[in-house]
Amino acid sequence: MIAEKMKPYVKNNSAIRMMFEEGNRLRAIYGPENVFDFSLGNPNVPVPEVNEAILEIVKEEAFNALHGYMSNAGFEDVRQTIAQSINERFGTSFSEKNLIMTVGAASGLNVILKSILNPGDQVIVFAPYFVEYDGYVRNYDGEVVRISPDTETFMPKLDEFEEKITKRTKAVIINNPNNPTGVVYGEDTIKALAAILEKKEKEFGISILLISDEPYREIVFSGFQAPWIPHLYRDTIVCYSFSKSLSIPGERIGYLVIPDEVDESGELITAASIANRVLGCVNAPSLIQKVIQYCIRHKVTVNVEAYEKNRDLLYHALKEDGFTCAKPDGAFYLFVKSPVADEKEFCETAKKHHVLMVPGSSFACPGYVRIAYCVSHEQIERSLPAFREIAREYGLLK
């Protein structure tokens, strides 16, 4: 009955979602206070201004204007507000025509990939990465080309990257700050990557899009800053989501930025707007678009310090317990080296202590696990004895 294309997805259903469901099962048995679920990147820091915005907008806006159809690209005034905010922050000169409101970053990536990919076109990704990218590319009969992980720094392996670019390369996806490592690619890294892309564009006589997936852009910790990548490489598309910056992942709202400098930008903007419609999204949710406008005007964002506090507590505790992990610069994940080669075995052992993590093979990087610390500070404190017992079980602590 189901399509052949769907069978691999059914067989290899998301480990992240499966672990989340396992968490629900364990909470029902042992109580929520005794289960330490670090599986899902579900933001936990409330942004109460979102609810305030909803109430005010529903009260003030005319019903049909608020809930009716609009341009497939979204409300013009909302897009202009976002464009102006970007211009003020990054010294750009965008207008509403450069933005397309999308049903979250996932939909935004599908929109841009549908707009550019022909069957057999290649899209390069850097492991470890959010492996849903694989499905998004295959949706349009593209081919994913993986760059192997540098497990010392988790920065892009640029030598391998240069070797794997071909005439069939249509796009490169980066995620900055990175899920699952929390690494932030700095300006020097992006400049080096851009130089390779420019060289290969000239060598092959093609245009290669750099798609910068940035749902964690605002969650960057003290001393670090994520660069505005269109300043560093002309053919850049920015894909953004408010899921993390406003703690509203269930509302599914984001946008694409397509700069005028991108090759054939006018045609691409039109194609992306149409793709938004024919993929079945039609337009981004109307009420939440207006909420985004309100939040930008009132300079509302999530309390990043809460995530930084969680990072510091968990990172230092795990290091003291003998675990190996890089200190993340942003997002809300720790990528921890498994004490055994099979990280799935490590996850199963942790589950016996009611600790839920996601195996690194779910991010094309076996031998590691992802811990999402977007949970209450109290949950992390309660989980520390369990992590210590796990460390003892593997001989990391005497």
Image (spheres, rainbow, N blue to C red):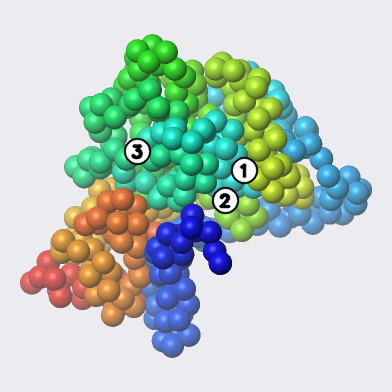
Q: Mark 2 sits on what residue?
A: 243
**Residue in view at x 40 percent, y 50 percent:** 131
Left or right relative to 289: residue 354: left
Q: CA distance from mark 3 to mark 2?
A: 27 Å
* Left or right of residue 30: residue 1: right
Of callouts 1 and 2, which one flags the residue occurring earlier in the amino acid sequence?
2
At 75% from the left and 38% from the top, the residue drawn is: 72
Q: Amino acid at mark 3?
A: Val
Kindly identify which residue carries mark 3.
Answer: 145
Q: Quadrant of residue 26?
A: bottom left
* Residue 174 shows in this picture: no
Give the residue at mark 1.
Answer: 254
Kindly report which numbered mark, 3 or 2, lies closer to the viewer in this rendering: 3
Q: Residues within 10 Å of mark 2 (few under 14, many from 20)?
A: many
Report whether residue 185 is seen.
yes
Q: Are marks 1 and 2 in contact (CB under 8 Å)?
A: yes
State which quarter of the image contains the C terminus.
bottom left
* Tag in front: 3 or 1: 3
Amino acid type at mark 2: Ser
Does residue 80 sit above or below 339 in this rendering?
above
The residue type indicated by label 1 comes to Gly
